[in-house]
Amino acid sequence: MLIIDSKDCENIDKALKKYKKKFEKARILLQLRSRQSFTKPSVKRRNEVLKAVYKQQLSTGKFDA
């Protein structure tokens, strides 16, 4: 649960903006989307490896983006 401390004199727009930033930093939406369907551990691992290979190719310049 996200709690935003707002002062009495603070505008509601500022409080909403703080809430939205805190919501994004907490990555709640990503967690909800990932929990909608089960992903096998082997598939997760394969995706992590493929992502690492892609990043390594980008950094070495072997991959033309």
Image: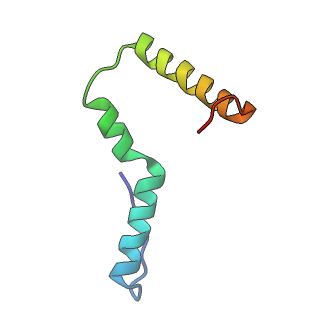
Name the spot of residue 1 as percent of width and height, x first.
35, 51
Q: Is residue 4 visible?
A: no
Say above or below: 62 vs 33: above
Tell me the colour scheme of the image: rainbow
Say above or below: 58 vs 26: above
Q: Is residue 52 visible?
A: yes
Q: Nearer the viewer, residue 29 or 50?
A: 50
Return the residue found at the far left: 36
Return the residue found at the far front: 64
34 displayed left or right of 56: left
The quarter of the rendered structure image containing the C terminus is: top right
At x 41%, y 15%, the residue is: 43
Return the residue found at the far top: 42
Q: Quadrant of residue 11?
A: bottom left
Name the spot of residue 29 as percent of width and height, x first.
34, 46
40 displayed left or right of 26: left
Name the spot of residue 5 as percent of width and height, x first.
43, 70
At x 40%, y 71%, the residue is: 17
Return the residue found at the far bottom: 9
Q: Quadrant of residue 13?
A: bottom left
